Image (tube, helix red, strand yellow):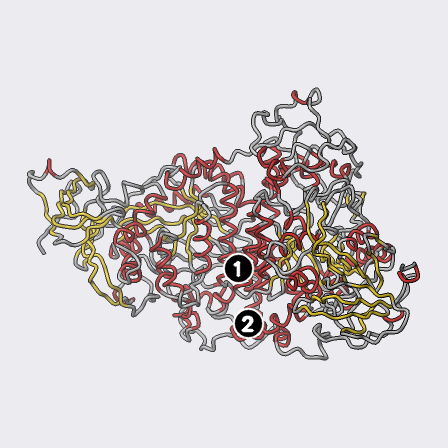
Amino acid sequence: MPGPGYLNSDRLLIKGGRIVNDDQSFHADIYMEDGLIKQIGDNLIVPGGVKTIEANGKMVIPGGIDIHTHFQMPYRGTTTVDDFAQGSKAALAGGTTMIVDHVIPDPGCSLMAAYDQWRQWADEKSCCDYSLHVDITHWNDSVKQEVENLIKEKGVNSFQVYMAYKDYYQMSNSELYDIFTFLAERGGIAEVHAENGEIIAEEQTRMLQMGITGPEGHVLSRPEELEAEAVFRAITIASQTNCPLYVTRVMSKSAADIISQARKKGHVVFGEPITASLGTDGTHYWSKNWAKAASFVTSPPLSPDPTTPDYLNTLLSSGDLSVTGSAHCTFSVAQKAIGKDDFTQIPEGVNGVEERMTLIWDKAVTTGKMDENMFVAVTSTNAAKILNLYPRKGRIAVGSDADLVIWDTDSIRTITAKTHNSATEYNVFEGMELRGAPQVVICQGKIVLEDGNLHVTSGVGRFIPCSPFPDFAYKRIKRNNIVNLAVLRAVPRGMYDGPVSEFSMSRGGTPSASARNSPTKQPVRNLHQSAFSLAGPPTPDDIPIRPAGRRIVVPPGGRSNITTLS
Amino acid sequence: SAYSHSGLDSSERLLIKGGRVVNDDQSLYADVYIEDGLIKWGRIWLYRGGIKVIEANGRMVIPGGIDVNTCLMKHYLGTQPADDFLQGTKAALAGGTTMIIDHVTPAPGESLLEAFECWQEAADKKACCDYSLHVDIPQWNEIVKDELELLVQEKGINSFQVYMAYKDTYQMSDSQLYEAFSFLKQLGAVVLVHAENGDLIAQEQRKILGMGITGPEGHPLSRPEELEAEAVFRAITLGNRVNCPVYITKVMSKSAADTIAQARRKGSVVFGEPITASLVTDGSHYWSRNWAKAAAYVTSPPLSPDPTTPDHLNTLLACGDLQVVGSAHCAYSTSQKAIGKDDFTLIPEGTNGVEERMGFVWDKAVAMGKMDENQFVAVTSTNAAKIFNLYPRKGRIAVGSDADIVIWDPYSVKTITAKLQQSASEYNIFEGLECRGGPVLVLSQGRVVYEEGKLQAQQGTGRFIPRKHFPDYAYQRVKFRNQVKKQQGVTRGLYDGPVYDVVPTPKYITPAPSAKTSPISHQPPPIRNLHQSNFSLSGAQLDDNIPRRSGHRIVAPPGGRSNITSLG
């Protein structure tokens, strides 16, 4: 029987498993030491006293990466009920060994300060490795500087902007253009909350005037067209600025369709459906039970169209949608009740960090839509590639982190709030019978779940820095830059020397905003010289690119120090 | 030829004999009798004297064309287009178009009503064919609302254009568009949309100028067709939300047209108007070495550099995905275009096309086998009359309709050149193109105004044709949807569980600007719950009835709530 000593052992051997990566599956043993995978193969020569896990032919997969969580998120003086300890515990229980949380600075406040705050919270409590997205909630020169520093020094490569939440988080088209341009030059990923905030504001007013104050007003005022519209617009802006785009929370068929069409036209865009949109629908907003209805409130809302989950699972399987998050953001019923008389005041968020992998297995793999390799891709590998963490995360390979899961495809369990690891009273998947679950979860080379028992340790989670210019997105972007510049050439023609009509600038006419301040009359001059070098082959001395696709044979210096749990 | 006429006699009686009458729904051999500018029952009058007989010899007799988009007075930086109402309507008639709908384009801050009157006065003096007016909305405020109401109710205007481009001048925000759509829908007007994303255009223009590109090629480079498609998509989304018919003026690109076609397939009430230029030529000319030629093509949205665009648009027009053809005729002389010789953003926008419109639709769509003659009548005349509530007075050959009639020769061939055009501008963007099909004879208000290449138009004979609101073609579906779409809230007991205390000044908040103003509102009567059925669909939750939950059901609504019934 494995005693406590075994649990804390730094050396582990998984025997007889079938390793499933996103590209292939094969039978091999895995030997782990110091939190890293050291050997893969048959008849490995391992030191004595190694704890051995018999996989008995079961799947061994890279631990899941939940690319979208909101743990311990402040909201109007309160915080979400799952802090980093509770949230990451739920993650591990579901087979997710890394989470990526969103830093949300108050508009007008420092991004860096918010980042530091989140780091502190997560370092104190997280039970698994984590990275951070930073949300850009306002835009000016000082924010620019902070974004630059976050990319260069703080290991953040993805930033979320909002097209909704009018007069608060919402960015104008011009600001989005500026931000996307800025991020594209620095190798960042532009993440976007895509909903048309202007129209939502109008619709909310209309609903409230009609006397609709309950949670059904949430979905009635945020119809899926407004999500699709914003996705379409975001893709247009990203294509103009040649910036990789990542759409967080794909909740509807129409939004997913727009992404899939854009990908077919060659746009660099990634779509992230979440556990809730893959598992349930928006019919519950009409529940007579206010608390239940309110527990489904999230934005964009779940679609009332009951065929949505199946459709999104299909697009996820075909590769049109790329990654899955949970957008886990849990409030208690009392917190949701802030909006009991006005749906616009209901705090937004649903659970899903624990159910994510199981739900995808059940809805996509067991239904025959998706194979096991694609399952690994959408739950782990693709996220690692986008965040430039691949192959350290998202792959079972020598040199990679020892975050892995033995997956039991036969397990069946019923989801209920009574047994889930989240602190919230409701579970939006309540009563669902789901097939597939983790049997053993190994995080940082330690067993954290075995025989149904969780052994997590708060505070062991490390911050994993993400570097800019992930190949997965930027290889194409760089090529596009070169192609675009070939098109943007002035026609060499003689000066027009014919008559010119008298005109006055003060009166009407077809206006052009830039007319007044346009730098004209110097056909030779090129203010954007710098843009050329950007597009050209990357100059190593300018841009510190760390190619993501290179295997790390030797663990980076200093890493081996982080080995003990105590 | 076998006919004669006296153009000035308004009580003139005419008989078109032996023609094949082609309407949008059918073609038939029949004679057409005309008196007092109207088509009348023939038999009764046939034997009265003084009838001029026109022998059609089996040729097509079609309703005169309606050009839904002209800009004959759109001043630019103090200058007027080269073609005014006289020149422009002459060109229209020469091409078989017997009615135009011109855009009144008030400058920002200017009164819509005054601008309208100014246009009407000018057109009454000069127009040679019947006309109507669209009014463009240059800004959104309370005064504009009052003026719109007046224009609809008293002036016979039922279509207004809003702009999604031209940042800081004409452009409206999404909120303003939502309000404008809602308001115009109440008035029963058709919303015309200039669909381009002005914010992004402004950014792109700065970028392109910054790169040293100042010539006309900068125009399409800074206005890629994606920005058109994006705005079309957004306009349709707004239209769907408000449940209001949306009409996209100047469909210039494949992607914009596809967006419209897809939306129609999903049931949106949306109409698309390609123009002569987008159906015939493409944007490759912006790269011409001849500055004046390149500038002649400058219009917004720009012609697409994709050379397969015209063919695609003609196909969609033929299959009904696009409905009407305008010309967006707005002719500026080369010296006017040269205002932007050092900066493409200053080039006045507009191309010719009012004269060539019908000929080219025939050439590109009918002669190519894409479209039949009835659909030809639909897209050049009938659909426009229906959308803008002129039908069947205009757009149809029927008893009681206006005698705006064209005898069409499908086999005539001519080569387009600026030397022979009616328009006063020096360039013709269709220069050198051969065009099959053209009018042999044109009747406007029952008078022969064009025959065998000779124009006999009379300045000032054009009448303003008022148009009623709520055109059936656009609004019938909208009315039914209004009835279907009535949304209902759920009647449920008040939540009486614990509520988290929030700080009065919200720090982190999902903001709702409307939240403050919302009253605690009366609940809709608890008659029916449309979504009741969905509960069984999703299955009862395990914990639905667990009492520890704070959200358990309250059977009787708490006292006092029923008193709160009015919104104040």
Q: Give whichever of A446, B434 is nearer the camera.
A: A446
Q: Position of residue A512 (x, y in %)?
A: 52, 59
The residue lying toward the viewer, choosing from B179 and A215, is A215
Q: Which of the 4 quarters of the picture holds residue A206?
A: top right
Q: Which image quarter holds the C terminus of chain B?
A: top right
Residue B447 vertical position relative to residue A97 in the rendered view, above or below: above
Question: What numbered label is drawn on residue A480?
Answer: none
Residue B267 visible, this orientation: yes
Kind of residue sitting beneath label 2: Asn
Q: Is residue A53 left or right of residue A260?
A: right
Q: Which mark is residue A484?
A: 2
Residue plotted at (13% across, 52% down): B56
Who comes first in sequence, dot 2 or dot 1? Answer: 1
- Assign a secondary structure to mark 2: helix
Q: Is residue B180 left or right of residue A128?
A: left
Q: Residues within 10 Å of mark 1 (few under 14, many from 20)?
A: few
- In-front residue for pair A509/B542: B542
Q: Are marks 2 and 1 on the same chain?
A: yes
Q: Is residue A554 left or right of residue A158?
A: right
Residue at 65% from the left image edge and 67% from the top image edge: A184
Separation (CA) of disc 2 from disc 1: 21 Å
Circle 2 or circle 1, nearest the eye: 1
Q: Position of residue B58 (x, y in %)?
A: 14, 53
Q: Which residue is mark 1?
A: A261
State the image quarter where residue A369 is shown: bottom right
Residue type at tag 1: Gln
